[in-house]
Image (spheres, rainbow, N blue to C red):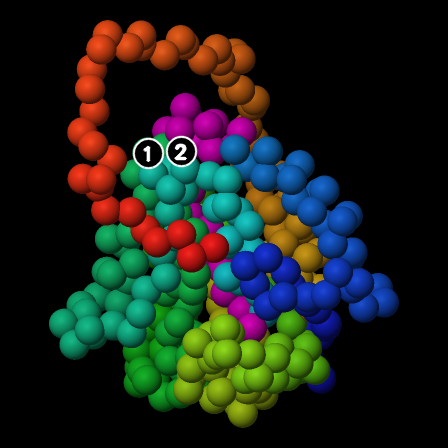
């Protein structure tokens, strides 16, 4: 069995009951810590903008490991103009003829931006490798060129952080079953997700081979134990905050100005407007 363990979720992810299973983080404690960390994320955002930093964070891992939930909690309180999420779909026929990294490069941040990749160029070392969507030559070239590509990004001044969300065989099975039986979550399961379940060992081998070549000093892989999704999110955010030194740029307290006085302007009749029906 993989080193990868057990978990649950809440708002925005696979819902977990308030009474977490034994050993899991309770909702009340989780929400309290999450609130503190999200305040710090806002401070980090302001620092990135002020210093003109370019930050890229990659989220990789098993299907249903909780990558999406972690990304949601990070972006929840941030400005989408500064912090963007990139989740690319299947490459088009044209993109398949391009340099492999080309479509990812187009989404890299400018000064004062942070980009979170919900899966990234590591698709080639994972799903493409296991499912046979790339040739052996393309795969080997990726393992050779990826470390150099990332070193090049770092030399250009970009901050690159890579997270791998690790989940156990048993916990992935539980989450998949939960998605199968919940209509609001069934969209999360694709044919590729089901194949990843069937080919658990192949994906394990692919991940280990990927780490062997791409866990480099300049851009190491940080493994997030994700069987307990609440703990995984908190640990990931806490680590992200520790990686980028930042200062508190909280502005002085704002004062709301008085509203402009009414000088007799007559607004159009309310009956001229079309309202959403008040069903609730």
The residue singled out by tag 1 in the image is 111
Instruction: Identify which residue is drawn at 56% across, 23% down.
Output: 247
Residues rendered magenta in the picture: 43-64
Query: Is 146 located above or below residue 234 in the figure?
Result: below
Evaluate whether residue 202 shows in this view.
Answer: no
The residue singled out by tag 2 in the image is 53
Q: Is residue 50 magenta?
A: yes
Query: Is 159 located above or below residue 225 in the figure?
Result: above
Q: Residue furthest left?
A: 94
Q: CA distance from mark 1 to mark 2?
A: 5 Å
Q: Is residue 261 left or right of residue 210?
A: left
Q: Position of residue 249 (x, y in %)?
A: 52, 20
Evaluate whether residue 103 shows in this view.
Answer: yes
The answer to whether marks 1 and 2 mark residues whose Cβ atoms lie closer than 8 Å is yes
Q: Position of residue 224 (x, y in %)?
A: 64, 60
Q: SS at mark 2?
A: loop
Classify 10 Å Cα crowding around label 2: few (below 14), some (14-19), many (20 and above): many
Q: Which mark is residue 128?
A: none
Q: Is residue 12 magenta?
A: no
Instruction: Identify which residue is drawn at 71% across, 56% down.
Output: 231
Q: Residue furthest right?
A: 22
In the rendered image, which quarter contains the N terminus?
Answer: bottom right
Q: Is residue 98 left or right of residue 201?
A: left
């Amino acid at each position: 069995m993989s080193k990868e363990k057990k978990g649950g979720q809440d708002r925005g992810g696979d819902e977990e009951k308030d009474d977490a299973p034994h050993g899991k983080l309770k909702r009340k404690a989780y929400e309290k810590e999450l609130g503190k960390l999200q305040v710090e994320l806002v401070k980090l955002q302001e620092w990135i903008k002020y210093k003109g930093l370019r930050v890229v964070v990659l989220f990789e891992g098993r299907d249903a490991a909780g990558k999406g939930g972690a990304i949601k909690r990070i972006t929840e309180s941030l400005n989408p103009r500064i912090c963007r999420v990139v989740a690319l779909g299947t490459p088009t026929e044209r993109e398949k003829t391009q340099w492999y990294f080309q479509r990812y490069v187009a989404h890299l941040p400018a000064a004062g931006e942070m980009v979170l990749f919900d899966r990234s160029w590591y698709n080639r070392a994972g799903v493409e490798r296991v499912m046979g969507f790339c040739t052996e030559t393309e795969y080997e070239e990726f393992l050779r060129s990826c470390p150099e590509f990332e070193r090049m990004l770092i030399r250009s001044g970009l901050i690159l952080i890579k997270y791998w969300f690790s989940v156990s065989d048993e916990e992935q099975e539980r989450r998949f079953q939960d998605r199968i039986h919940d209509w609001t979550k069934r969209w999360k399961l694709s044919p590729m997700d089901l194949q990843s379940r069937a080919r658990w060992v192949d994906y394990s081998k692919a991940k280990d081979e990927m780490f062997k070549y791409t866990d480099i000093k300049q851009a190491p892989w940080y493994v997030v134990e994700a069987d307990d999704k609440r703990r995984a999110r908190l640990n990931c955010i806490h680590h992200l905050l520790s990686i980028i030194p930042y200062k508190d740029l909280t502005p002085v307290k704002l004062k709301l100005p008085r509203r402009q006085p009414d000088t007799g302007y007559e607004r159009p009749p309310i009956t001229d407007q079309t309202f959403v029906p008040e069903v609730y």
